[in-house]
Image (cartoon, helix red, strand yellow):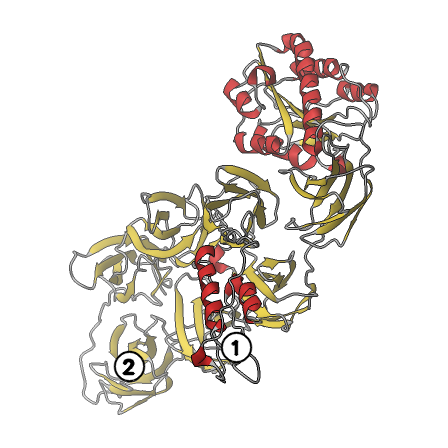
Amino acid sequence: MVVLVDGSWSIGRINFRLVRLFLESLVRAFNVDLHKTRIGLAQYSGDPRIEWHLNTHTTKMAVIDAMKNLPYKGGNTLTGLALTYILENSFKPESGSRAGVPKIGILITDGKSQDDVIPPARSLRQAGIELFAIGVKNADESELRAIASPPEETHVYNVADFNVMADIVEGLTKNICERVEHLDQTLKGVSGGPSSPVAPPRDLVTSDVTARSFRVTWSHAPGQVEKYRVVYYPASGGQPEEKVVQGQETTVILNYLNSLTEYQVAVFAVYRSSASEALRGSATTLALPMVNTLQLSEVTHSTMRVGWQRAAGASGYMILYAPLTEGEPADEKEVKVEQEVEEVELEGLTPDTEYTVTVYALYGDEASDPITNQETTLPLTPAKNLRFSAVDHSSAHLHWGSASRQVNSYRIMYVKTNGVQTNEVDAGKVTSWLLRNLTSETEYTVAIFAVYDEGQAEPITESFTTEVVPEPLNLRSSDVSTDSFRLSWKPAASDVVLYRITWRPRLGRDTEEYLVDGGVTSYELSGLVPSTEYQVSVVALYADLAESDPSSLTQATVERTTTIATTTITTSAPRYGVRNLVVGEETTFSLTLTWSNMADSRHLRHYRVTYVSTKGDRAPETTTVVPGQTSLLLQPLLSDTEYRLTVTPVYHDADGPGASRVARTLPLSPPRGLRVSEEWYNRFRISWDAPPSPTMGYRVVYQPVSGPGPALETFVGEDVNTMLIVNLLSGTDYSVKVIASYSTGASEALSGRAKTLYLGVTGLSAYQVRMTSMCAQWQPHRHASAYRTVRSRRTSWGGGVSRHCFSGLKANMRYKISVHALLQDGTEGPAVTLLEHTLPAPTPPPTKPPTTTPLPTIPAAKEVCRAAKADLVFLVDGSWSIGDENFQKIINFLYSTTGALDRIGPDGTQVPDLPGGRYSVHSVAILN
């Protein structure tokens, strides 16, 4: 007897003390002893646990003391899980459960279960366990009736409060004892009926044990035994089967058994009017010989070699392999090989992935227990030894070592170390590349990805910094006159966009400036003052808005020879232009401008910043910046739009020279790299890489690809790049979209597919089909803890064994067999169905003809046949369609025909016998 006590929080500690007192009263009614009544107890809430097993306490007082000290557990109410738990843990031989002894389960609960109780209660009852259900206070009576064994009036108790539980002790113990007595008689009846004074057989021996059979041998019982009944059934519970042999036999082979299963056996001597007591014993079938020493070797990123030692008698081997990532069933692959093969190379594996490899030894349609091993494929070989050469202000040469001969191409990603905009280049199979159009004086981080058919390897990364932009070289003057001279220089670099030339008298403050094209290397300054020394500088301007250091010189004009009147000239304050104007920190809705401080800002009022779309579809916008501030964040701007930005210094009397740059805001980039992981029967996880631009968050939309189900949507924050999607349909393809949300709109969708795992079993097939029995087998479900088989409304539960045999069937009948997988979390999969016919019974032979029919008289030889010499052959149809009466007429015909011959034998006519079917004996008698 196993008591299952609800220890959830709803009981309460005070009421739990009353439960202890009730259990003490219940125990006192029984004779507790290892050879009498054994009592075990389990307590449950969210997770059940064994308080003590059936063979823990051997006396009544020991059990009562344990009841008094029973701790209060606390938790949720999961009754269904607890019922399954005691079936798998309490009612086992190792826990003290005895074969051939009535088994009782008593449930005490105060509420409704939070999981399904019907399947586990049914399993307990089918295992021969009598269930009593006691509900207190808020218990659900319909649930109690679903759990308890029939009839409910003696097996279901529901009391209003814990204080009155003592009132049901007497009635409960009486009903339990009556059921124990009835069960004991039933068990003895199943084993051979009521006892008799006739002595049973002796010396039961089991031998020749295989995975599917064993031999039972015994010594004769005394007296005139007519028959022996051999009854056998699995010790863990199941329908008894029997074989009957004649009284002179003392051995029988029990076939079509489950492998690795303990069977209880009882042999009864059957007399004319009575039967003996049972001679009992047991035997455990062997496991089918399985593969030994499974080895995984020669592992690469996409292959591994599987080797094993052959199993004795195997007709072949089946290899199953799958990534150990909760992948969907389609990910599991199968390879079958012949019996002489003991090594297979698995190909097309995913790099850097742990695989579980299982090998079964096949014996016809049956498979042994598996042997499993795990190994991780190597990661894809990355590129190596990244280095840089010829680094200047706008380019750098990359070099790296080859990754592998299997590489398809190399992908180069580079980004400003303090920036967000990522650039990508597909370099093909080369191992060097020139990066162009870089920004000067900027650190870049470079990553090289080796790309294979299976994906891309981990990157190799390094950083470098570009040089300062070069200034014009060898600035010199020529053609000097009283009011002009020519400047010339050598080009600073090939990518100079403009040269800015500035000049002013050395003792003056008026500065003039002029821009010339980057391809020009000389310029004439004119309109100068005679006999005046000028300071001149030339600055190179580049496409990345950088400015070089100036190249400078001093040159004086020639003195004018004519006399001129002396005039005092008053000059205004100098007006300097903005220098080193740079645009950076681009986002989808903003740009940042920075520039250098003015050489002299004493007369500066402010800066005027103007920005406008280069398309000309919007009016310019203007803002001002106070002196001393050298940066400005412009927002909000349109995404993916090119702007012209101008910064002009404004002095008290006029504007200074302005500087302009062109820059583009970032596009509304979608997320990248959608990945699916943690696939389960009702959920999967998706992950993605954030786009280069800052976002406000992501919209995640998912919907079944086929079948019912609306599109569902959720929103996550900008710092989230992974999401577990739950409450999905099993075995279903889903389309998944991730959309980045920005302040100025939404990106294109990043789309992909994901699939939940399938709950049902696969590969259901029939084998060993006979007239009155058949077996079914299926591929083991990776996460199944048990299977439920249904045949003609008869349900059976099994453990992790992926096969089941059905007996007691009718010949030439079609049977529907369904298999459900019961998963470890309690979920039951859908029915997978098989239709199969049993074999037809053989056609019974027709009634034998009477043996007393007199043979016809052989007539005298015909005159015409005298002295005839020939070889004469009769071919007679002797099939069942002829019939006894007609075949007798054929016999008469043969007698008449052979009687017409004069001499039969080598010296006359030879007549051999060529009989047909069951009537050949008559032909032999005639022709001999």
Disc 1: CA contacts within 10 A as few (<14), some (14-19) or many (>=20):
some
Say which element carries label 1.
Answer: loop
Mark 2 or mark 1, whichever is nearer to me: 1
Q: Amino acid at mark 1?
A: Val
Q: Position of residue 350 (x, y in %)?
A: 52, 66
| Cα distance in 3D space between marks 2 and 1 | 125 Å
Q: Amino acid at mark 2?
A: Gly
Q: Position of residue 588 (x, y in %)?
A: 32, 56
Does 912 sit left or right of 636 as displayed?
right
User: Disc 2 marks which residue?
Assistant: 518
Does 770 sit left or right of 66 as displayed?
left
Does 667 sit left or right of 457 as displayed?
left
Say which element carries label 2.
Answer: loop
Identify the residue at image location x=50%, y=40%.
Answer: 828
Asked whether the viewer can see residue 904, the reply is yes
Q: Nearer the viewer, residue 24 or 797?
A: 797
Identify the residue at image location x=71%, y=43%.
Answer: 263
- The quarter holding residue 363 reads bottom right
Mark 2 or mark 1: whose residue is earlier in sequence: 2
- The quarter holding residue 271 reads top right
Asked whether the viewer can see residue 395, the reply is no
Q: Position of residue 174 (x, y in %)?
A: 69, 13
**Residue at far bottom of view:** 479
User: Disc 1 marks which residue?
Assistant: 911
Which of the numbered marks, if any, corresponds to residue 882? none
- The quarter holding residue 617 reads bottom left
